Image: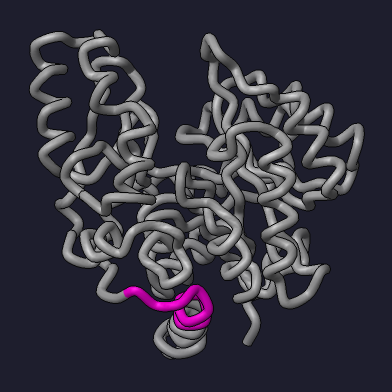
Amino acid sequence: MPLTTKLTQRLGIQHPIIQGGMHYVGYAPLAAAVSNAGAIGVITALTQPNAEALRSEIQKTRSLLRSPDTPIGVNLTVLPQLNSPDYPAIVQVLLDEKVPMVETAGSPKCAELWELLKAGNPDVCIIHKCTTIRHALKAQAMGCDMISLDGFDCAGHPGETDVGNFLLQPIAARKLSVPYVTSGGVGDGKQLAACLAMGAEGVNLGTRFMATAEAPIHDNIKKALVAGDENSTQLVMRSLKNTERVYKNAASDEVLRIEAEHPGQIDKIYHIVKGENYRASFQETGDAQSSVWSCGPVMGLIESVPTCDELVRGMVSEAEAVIQGRLAEMCR
């Protein structure tokens, strides 16, 4: 039984699963493997040093696809910063390469990029990440096609309201008119079935795809994800109102210690939280303790490191079994 949803129909994919954008993880090998599995893989734009490097990564991803028509996506985060990336150049690359799906996150300035994307490619599907219903309604009004709704159990930035997906998702089903997908804490087929039951058109997985054979990160990081459990994360940078859920280790403990003494002072912790540190952990050293890196409590469901194809097929099969078996039996 195929799980046909508005997400699969809009993107032309087989399974309602998105591999979310992840800094220093969303490269060609992972994105291609996920798309080849019938879901949709996503390249992280800002992991690339510039727009032309992103173009090369998109082309590399397509060279790894079994079919040239297989859809892929690109994640583009828009944040206010002094040395802002060349967003117009990135958008032009997305248009030149005819990327069918763009996952955006960040400030309301995203809407300016949506206009550029839609002007150059009216068929592009823009999925915007939100952590609250209020922000989701605003993004809907500003013109995105779908919402990726991040509950409090997501890795990375869960927002500041601490509302979990078990409540956030059915509220979204009542209040949103555009389709939405569930993001945060999803790692197996039972959850996929539950998300569809609550009103989602699919799910967005981050941490779970980190622990796959094709994820281009050090094996020691994958081992840490398997060894971890639902209590192996903690929240840092709350005093900056830029809360991030990260792996609980020596580095994150030190950040919390410094934050307690110097709340709201990024300069006191920047040497620990800067991206170069976890890039080195992911790509070079494999040291899971020395840097602050994002992951979610879905570690409690991670027991192995399968291929992306095995993970996607297993999740979908389990969801189908729940829907056709356990739930169907309850209705007899």
Question: Residue 329's x, y, as percent?
Answer: 43, 90
Number of numbered labels in the structure image? 0
Look at the image and tell me whether residue 331 can be seen: no
Question: Residue 271's x, y, as percent?
Answer: 26, 21
Look at the image and tell me whether residue 8 can be seen: yes
Residue at 68% across, 69% down: 64
User: Does 22 appear above or below 219?
Assistant: above
Residue at 53% across, 27% down: 134
Q: Is residue 115 left or right of residue 324?
A: right
Dividing the picture into quarters, in which one does residue 88 lie?
top right
Q: Is residue 195 left or right of residue 223?
A: right
- What secondary structure prevails in the magenta region? helix
Question: Residue 274's x, y, as percent?
Answer: 34, 27
Q: Is residue 307 magenta?
A: yes
Viewer-nearest residue: 279 or 69? 279
Q: Is residue 297 magenta?
A: no
Which quadrant of the figure contains the N terminus?
bottom right
Viewer-nearest residue: 50 or 327? 50
Q: Which residues are magenta?
A: 305-314
Viewer-nearest residue: 323 or 80? 80
